[in-house]
Every structure is written in C-alpha cells, then in structure tokens.
Amino acid sequence: MPAGSVPGGSAAGGETSQTLDRGLRLLHLVAEVPGGLTVSEAASRLGIGRAAVYRLVGPLAGHGMLRRDAAGRLRLGAGVLHLARRAQPLLAEGALPALRRLAEQAGATAHLTVVEGGEGVALAVVEPSWTSFHVAYRTGARHPLERGAAGRAILAGRSGDAGPVSTEGELQPGAYGVAAPVLGVPGLEASVGVVALAPLDADAVGAEVLAAATAVAVALR
C-alpha cells in the first residue's frame, strides 16, 4: 500500500459526498415548502429512511440551517438568512455595471430583483443620470411575484421563458415596467428590469433589458 494512503478512503469520500448532497437537497426541499416538512415527508421526498433524515437534521440544526417548530416540522433556520444577507451585497456589486448601462440606455430606473421568502425584493437600484424625472424605487422594496414586471419575469423564468415582460400600473399607478429573468445562475431566482413614468418602447427597451439580464447572469456565475 502506498505511503499515506487510507484503507477505504475512496468509499469514505463517496459516503461524505452523498451525505453532503442529501443535506443540501434537504435544505432546498424545506425552502420550497412554506409550511415546512415533517421528517416523514422529507424522508419520502429524498427517498431515504427517517433515521437518515434525523442524522442530516442534527448537524444542519447545529449550524442554524434548519430548525424544528412546535409541531416538529422542519423549517429553515436563521443561519440560512445570515448567509443570504452576506451574499446579497456581492450579488448587488456584480450586477451594478450592467444596471448602470441599462439605466442610461433606457432613461429609466433599473433594478435587480431577487426572490426572498416568496416575494420579490429590490436588491440593487440604479437611477439614470440625465433624465428630468424618473421613478424613485427603494432598495429593499418588496412585492408579490404576481404583480409587476420584475416578479412576473421571475415566474416566467421558472418555466424557461427568457423573454421580456411588460406591465403598467401594477405596483404604482402610472408606472410602466419591463423586466427579464436572470437565468443560468445556480441557486438564484432574479430578474433585471426598468421602471418609468412614461410608456416604454417594448421592443427597444425589451432588447436592452434582455442584454442586461444576460450580462448580470454572466457576472454572477
């Protein structure tokens, strides 16, 4: 046996990888169910036994990634929120160059919207420098995904539709929006869009928004 080798090392490494994969899949499953999952439901969806789920829950709960509520259902823990908050500034920073170009090209307020807690959240906002009037859109603003171009684009992206989405007055009376989903970034559901106080040329602005969404996706991969 070569010096430094460990009997069964390959098998142990495979076992560790499988455990890590199952743990990550469990986190994703819990995140997708607003009401949480029972251990039995998690076991069924993962295709493993309840005992194996308990072995996954222990370390994940210890790191604050999972918690069990009063009814014993598995829910995301505060540790996930902590990681998300640490990641958000990095996402915003990566998207800013494309957002600045988009705001100047379209003459409208550009934004990156991400999914958080089942809602759309404006993570980064850039206002155009040369317009007399533009929409003031606050970073951190939340809205249902079913309302507004940003949220509707995210929903369209879930079905693989990358085309621009246009809306009028759904979030703010008299405001017009065009957005497109950011696709191909693992673990991220987001859209890039613009909002203006006047009607937007769906073709011209739609092309600019699509180009910006693609640029953001490349920057964040």
Image (cartoon, rainbow, N blue to C red):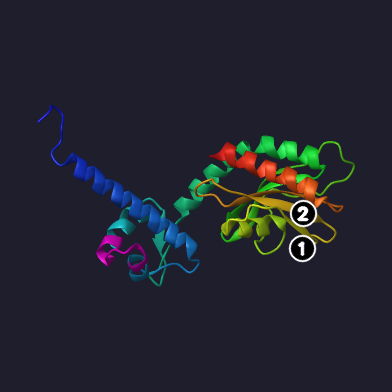
SS type, badge 2: strand
127 inside magenta stretch: no
Q: Quadrant of the N terminus?
A: top left
Residue type at mark 2?
Gly
Which residue range is magenta in the image? 44-53
Q: Magenta span: helix, strand or loop, mainly?
A: helix
Residue 73 in percent (x, y) is at 40, 68
One can see residue 82 in this view: yes
> Image point 58% across, 38% down: which residue?
218
Proximity of marks 2 and 1: CB atoms separated by less than 8 Å: yes
How would you rate the neighbour count of disc 1 (Cα within 10 Å): few for under 14, some for 14-19, many for 20 or more? some
On the rendered structure, is 1 left or right of 74?
A: left
Q: Position of residue 138 (x, y in %)?
A: 73, 49
Q: Is residue 20 above or below residue 146?
A: above
The answer to whether residue 46 is magenta is yes
Q: Which disc, if any, is residue 170?
A: 1
* Label of residue 6 in the image: none
| Front-most of residues 39 and 82 | 39
Q: Earlier in the sequence, mark 2 or mark 1?
A: 1
Relative to 95, is 166 above or below?
below
Q: Secondary structure at mark 1?
A: loop
